[in-house]
């Protein structure tokens, strides 16, 4: 019984870390896509040289992904169930 509780807690921690990492990576990537970059090969859809040529679309998609990760974290209550 002790091993099953250790495994269950370990899985919860791994899922918590993966969800946090996904949320943080998505949010950082969203900010990175809108930053101007003079070495870019083409203008983005907004009209300036950015890291990503699909700047408004990719930023919205990445922010949506970050919100989904945070929603899953809150909805599954992993923050409350981990001791």
Image (cartoon, helix red, strand yellow):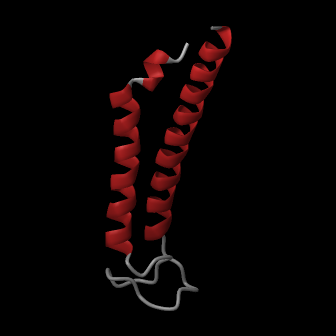
Q: Position of residue 27 (x, y in %)?
A: 46, 52
46 sits left or right of 40 in the view: left
- Give the residue at the far front of this rendering: 1
28 sits left or right of 59 in the view: right
The quarter of the picture where the C terminus appears is top right
Q: Position of residue 66 (x, y in %)?
A: 40, 49
The quarter of the picture where the N terminus appears is top right
Residue 38 vs 13, above or below: the answer is: below
Q: Residue at x 52, y 91 (%)?
A: 41
Residue 75 vs 23, above or below: the answer is: above
71 sits left or right of 20 in the view: left
- Give the residue at the far right of this rendering: 3
Q: Position of residue 67 (x, y in %)?
A: 35, 46
Q: Residue at x 46, y 60 (%)?
A: 31
Using the image as rendered, state which of residue 26 and residue 14 is in the foreground: 14
Residue 78 vs 43, above or below: the answer is: above
Q: Position of residue 58 (x, y in %)?
A: 38, 69
Q: How many marks?
A: 0
Residue 60 vs 4, above or below: the answer is: below
Using the image as rendered, state which of residue 7 and residue 29 is in the foreground: 7
Using the image as rendered, state which of residue 56 and residue 9 is in the foreground: 9
- Give the residue at the far bottom of this rendering: 41
Q: Residue at x 50, y 76 (%)?
A: 51
């Amino acid at each position: 019984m002790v091993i099953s509780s250790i495994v269950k807690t370990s899985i919860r921690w791994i899922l918590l870390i993966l969800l946090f990492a996904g949320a943080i990576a998505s949010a950082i990537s969203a900010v990175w896509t809108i930053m101007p970059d003079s070495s870019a090969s083409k203008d983005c859809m907004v009209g300036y040289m950015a890291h990503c040529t699909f700047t408004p679309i990719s930023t919205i998609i990445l922010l949506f992904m970050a919100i989904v990760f945070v929603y899953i974290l809150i909805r599954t209550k992993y923050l409350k169930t981990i001791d």
